[in-house]
Amino acid sequence: MDSLFQRSLDDIIKGLRHQQAGESAFVSKVLEEVRREIKSTDSHTKSTALQKLTYLHSICFVDMSWAAFHAIECISYPNFTHKKVGYLAISQSFQESTPVILLISNQLRKDLKSNVEVEVSLALECLSRIGNLDLCRDLTPEVFTLMASSRIPVRKKAIGVVLRLFGKYPDAVRVCFKRLVESLESSDSPPIVSAVIGVFCELASKDPKAYLPLAPEFYKILVDSRNNWVLIKVLKIFTKLAPLEPRLAKKIVEPICELMSKTGAKSLMFECIRTILTSLAEHESAVKLAAGRINELLIDEDPNLRYLGLHALAIVAPKHIWAVLENKEFVIKSLSDPDPNIKLESLRLVMEMVSESNVVEICRVLVNYATKSEPEFCNVILGSILSTCSNNVYEIIVDFDWYVSLLGEMSRIQHCQKGEEIENQLIDIGMRVQDVRPELVRVGRDLLMDPALLGNPFLHRILSAAAWLCGEYVEFIRNPVELMESLLQPRTSLLPPSVRAVYLESAFKALVFCLHSYLKSAHGENGEASGTTLIQENHITPDSVLHLLNLIDMAVGPLSGSYDVEIQERARNILGFTELIKPVLSDSLHPQDERHKQQVEASKMVRLLHDTFSDELGPVSMSAQGRVPVPDGLVLHENLADLEAVCGSSLPASSATISFEGSHNVEGATSIFISDQKEESEPSSESTSLLAEHRKRHGLYYLPSEKNTEHHEANNDYPPANELKSGVTVSNDAQDLAKLAEQSFLPKRKSKQVKARPVVVKLDEGDVLPISSKIPQAKDDSLSEAVRDVLLGNKAAADSVIRKKGKEKLNAKEQEDDLDHMDSQSGTVQNPVKERSKRSSRKQNADEGDHGGDKGKQKRRHRHGKHRTREGVQNPPANVISQTPVPDLLL
Amino acid sequence: MIHFVLLISRQGKVRLTKWYSPYSQKERSKVIRELSGIVLNRGPKLCNFVEWRGHRVVYRRYAGLYFCMCIDEADNELEVLDIIHHFVEILDRYFGSVCELDLIFNFHKAYYILDEVLIAGEFQESSKRTIIRLLSTHDSMVEMAKEEATSIGNMIAQVTK
């Protein structure tokens, strides 16, 4: 009765199509019906319900894991329609973790043995989709039988399923592998060969070494087959095998070249190109041929072929950059292709071409290009410039002044979102390259001065770096007062607290520097010669000092009540310092006779701070911590759990003694402040000497810089990169690019370098994080081990599996026969390979001579591997297995 | 190997999904959402390959339907385009100038046809004639089963059970 009123699948589909808005309501109503109908005992009602559910599952992603058992019931119905519905439901919805999956095992076995071809196909397809370890282990014998089936479609599918069996249950190799290898030779039925090659292609991509002994079979297919599907797969296998065995490469290079020039199918041609470029790159003539075909791809109308052409260039670039340089114009033109994929690929190639001699031009063009691109691609360009230029501690950068101003220019590009990377590089360069600091400070100052930049959140990280650099290397600033003004401008309120804290600290440093310079000049102490020239340039007058102090009162004053502790603390530091300095300075600002005494006190204070700030910071090696010797009596691995209880009570008390900044009452704190400062200056000098010691030991000296004095003239030699004409249109751009290509992508290096490369501080080993090594996959290992065992005829292993099988009571007689057959032959599994290869080796004796007698001997030993003990060579048996014998065909 | 096959209409409706690599239900809908966003927004004269999470997605548009297949980095993109075309040609021959509605109302048949073209994520049959022949045997099996089920004797057996 149920079935009379049941809605069919068509009803559901029509219903869904007519729902405009309430689709989900409709779906849940249908689901409700399905839940009721699927419990029916009538097979038709049940399977229709299951079919509707499967439809909703694959189209609307409705959960159907609850119906797993019903699906299994459906495949057990004798009616083919119902069975089919059940199989579709299972292969669409079952996962390896589906709990009832093991209940399917018997039904699958039954269908695999069915006389009806279509039922067998259904079962095979299902197994290939859902097979887990248990299913694969249970059904391996059935699949093994089907691999020899006389019905081609069944045999083909069985071979396809083998891939799943091997992946889930590696021991299946010992049963099925021989038959798989035999199928390679069924040249009478192309679908079978196609299926087997597909399986081997997948297997070889995971562990090529194990399949090297099958090279003669693959070679035969490569030479004989006319089927493009098969040839592509064979080429893929050779791509993996050729790097392992140079003689194999020599052997296949000719047929592949021939195939490449003859074939009309682009897919096959591309596969030939890829095989040559990836695995036969040592064969110059072949690479030249392939490069010729790439040129054809590049000029094709079809964007697919152009994309693949660029892709092929990217493969060949590391080994044969000339192939890329030949097509440089096309590569650069592709930067303006409408297809983003092609653009990305060509950008990668352009970056491949970058070298010390052309980095300036390429970057200039790319930056120009980035300003005109859409945001996403713009950032991709900037990202690749940044990573290429910083590669291996700025290896390709000679002119750091240029690079630093390029960084500044990149920051100003409208869509730039690479703030973090630029920040890191600015600071990193500042620490590593002493000679570039004046330019760094100039770039930083320009960024800080521009109030418009403060509104762009992507730039905040860069501004933070600029502020830090200007504070740290303030001695290179020409007008520190101006710097102070930009660091304290009102719009800094737009900055996040962490960056603002950096701004304040830099302002503090700049203030100390100003006062120091002022006091020095007022004193008339003509200490160091360079000092006086700087002071004169700095124009620090009594007025400007007053102006600075007022500025600080006005801008920093309100921050002492900030909610952010970093800002509050630093603001209070500055305010405390000005409070201290003001009374002593105010007298000195008005010329009087007794100013002298107070000035001495003031200058002493300022000098102390100035000394603290002028200690130079250097880059720290990643492994520095590890090099610190552990002091006696310190146990690093001690359990600190009970410390928490102790800390809970004692911490507040101790913190008061640690931080003197904590004292909020400025007047009261005066004396403490001064005494603390004095104390602090001593350790700092101590650390300076330690640092000097360290540098002496590790040879980390800067070269004497001649550039400091003459960097103004130097600047004239190199016009800054940001003086580009902004009105260039995109079409002009392409021309520019093409012109540039002619000029700068010449393979020979231009040797005229006006300036020598400044010293870049590198740490002995700690600059690069160690890359964690890949963890080998256990499953693949066991699979390849099994393959090796079978190929090398490891009889014992095969026996043990068969014994195990016996325990599992395989009652099908046919199975037993097959396995027995296997057993008797398992010792000589590689025979077909060997015999043929012996035959062919005789043919190729002439070739053998070329390789020298040494190798020949070695190979002969391989061939007679079994008689090795007789020959007196004592090798442990394990060694025999681990060595991959190379077929003699290759000699 | 092919990791999955998707058929998506221009409106973003899913018409067929087949997964050869393990994806949970949650991942599946995420993959479809992500990919239809990428593929449907690509212009008409661009290349048919998209790099996606370390894999490559090859797609091709036939009328209002996008056929997408996800493959490994080392697989041959042009070959996969050929596979897609092969599949479409078989659909076309089987349904007689196929349209989207055929796939909507015969969704189980579409799966069966796909299963004849691919198995375990590998291409299995390049002969269209063979596949059409298999499909017609399959259909006649279904017909026989239906007749059997609706025969009077069977109905009586059902009722008196």
Image (spheres, coloured by chain):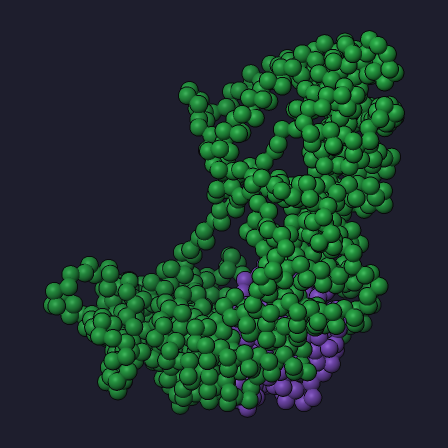
Which residue is more in the foreground, A243 or A766?
A766
Residue A527 in the image: state x and y as whole percent.
69, 24
Residue sitting at 62 percent across and 28 percent down? A615
Residue A363 in the image: state x and y as whole percent.
68, 59
Image quadrant assignment for residue A813: bottom left
Chain A rendered in what hue?
green
Describe residue A562's horizontal placement relative to residue A650 as left or right.
Answer: right
Q: Say above or below: A269 vs A202.
A: below
Q: Quadrant of the C terminus of chain A?
A: bottom left
Residue sitting at 24 percent across and 59 percent down? A878
Chain B rendered in what hue?
purple
Q: Say above or below: B141 vs A789.
A: below
Image quadrant assignment for residue A396: bottom right
Image quadrant assignment for residue A735: bottom right
Residue sitting at 42 percent across and 83 percent down? A254
Residue A225 in the image: state x and y as whole percent.
43, 87
| Residue A360 visible in the shown view | yes
Residue A183 in the image: state x and y as whole percent.
37, 81
Q: Say above or below: A342 vs A689.
A: below
Which residue is more in the foreground, A487 or A185?
A487
Residue sitting at 74 percent across and 81 percent down? B63
| Residue B105 visible in the shown view | no
